[in-house]
Image (cartoon, grey):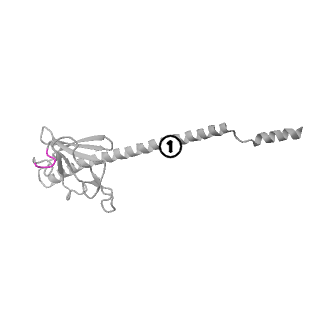
């Protein structure tokens, strides 16, 4: 009898999984892997969106800093504080005009008027993707690669005539938009 019970226990322990048990186990593993891939995909998409948003913020700040630098340089040289930008109606960023600037190569790519309206009509910013001294920089050089970022600058005159509002509109990706406004004073 002892031999019979040992054989029965031994045979019972050596049986494999049933087909139903195997299918349930595989289903659980597939659901776990699918959920992990879904979470990873969402995380990667959020990272790309965050990277683009941060880049757009920095490009908007760069536009404001470019105008600020022109103002400061003009004042140091005892020129009109908006010379070359918005001093005369023929200047590229004169009040009511939309313009683009290139902070990396301003000598070869001076400010350019895009339109007299407020719509996004300027070309997209380009990025240097070729190894060299300007690698990774953004600007308007025709030889650089076009990005999905669009930056437009508008200068609005304040009532006093001694201060202006610089408005930088950034558009990128599939419709994302950011507007930065900065008040600049004539510190004469």
Q: Residue pushed farthest right? A: 1
Q: Residue at x 29, y 40 (%)?
A: 177
Q: Residue at x 35, y 46 (%)?
A: 52
Rendering coords of residue 61 (x, y %):
27, 47
Residue 116 placement (x, y as % from top left):
15, 43
- In the picture as drawn, the residue positioned furthest to the front comes out as 19
Per the rendered image, the range of residues in magenta is 90-94
Q: Magenta span has 93?
A: yes
Residue shown at 19%/43% (left/top)? 154
Q: Is residue 106 magenta?
A: no
Dot 1: within a 10 Å radius of its alpha carbon, few (fewer than 14), some, or many (20 or more) residues?
A: few
- Residue with the most extreme bottom position: 132
Give the percent coordinates (x, y) of residue 153.
21, 45
In x, y percent, where is residue 29? 59, 41
For residue 55, side relative to residue 85 (left or right): right
When the figure is inspected, residue 24 is found, relative to residue 88, above or below; the finding is above
> Of 162 and 21, which appears nearest the observer?
21
Task: Say which element carries label 1.
Answer: helix
Q: Residue 179 or 159: which is nearer the viewer?
A: 179
Q: Which image quadrant: the N terminus?
A: top right
Helix, strand or loop: magenta stretch: loop
**How many marks do you count on the picture?**
1
Q: Quadrant of residue 42?
A: top left
Q: Which residue is mark 1?
A: 37
User: Residue at horizontal 13%, vertical 55%?
Assistant: 77
Residue 4, by quadrant, is top right
């Amino acid at each position: 009898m002892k031999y019979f019970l040992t054989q029965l226990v031994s045979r019972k322990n050596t049986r494999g999984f049933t087909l139903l048990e195997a299918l349930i186990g595989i289903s659980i593993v597939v659901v776990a892997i699918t959920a992990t891939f879904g979470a990873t995909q969402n995380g990667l998409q959020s990272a790309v969106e965050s990277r683009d948003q941060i880049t757009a913020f920095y490009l908007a700040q760069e536009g404001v800093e470019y105008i600020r630098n022109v103002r400061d340089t003009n004042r140091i040289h005892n020129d009109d504080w908006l010379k070359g930008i918005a001093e005369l109606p023929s200047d590229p960023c004169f009040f009511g005009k939309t313009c683009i600037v290139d902070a990396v190569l301003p000598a070869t790519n001076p400010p350019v008027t895009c339109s007299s309206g407020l719509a996004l009509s300027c070309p997209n910013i380009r990025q240097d993707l070729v190894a060299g001294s300007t690698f990774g920089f953004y600007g308007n050089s025709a030889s650089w690669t076009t990005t999905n970022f669009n930056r437009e600058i508008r200068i609005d005159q304040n009532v006093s005539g001694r201060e202006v509002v610089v408005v930088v509109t950034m558009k990128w990706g599939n419709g994302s938009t950011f507007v930065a406004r900065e008040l600049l004073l004539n510190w004469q």
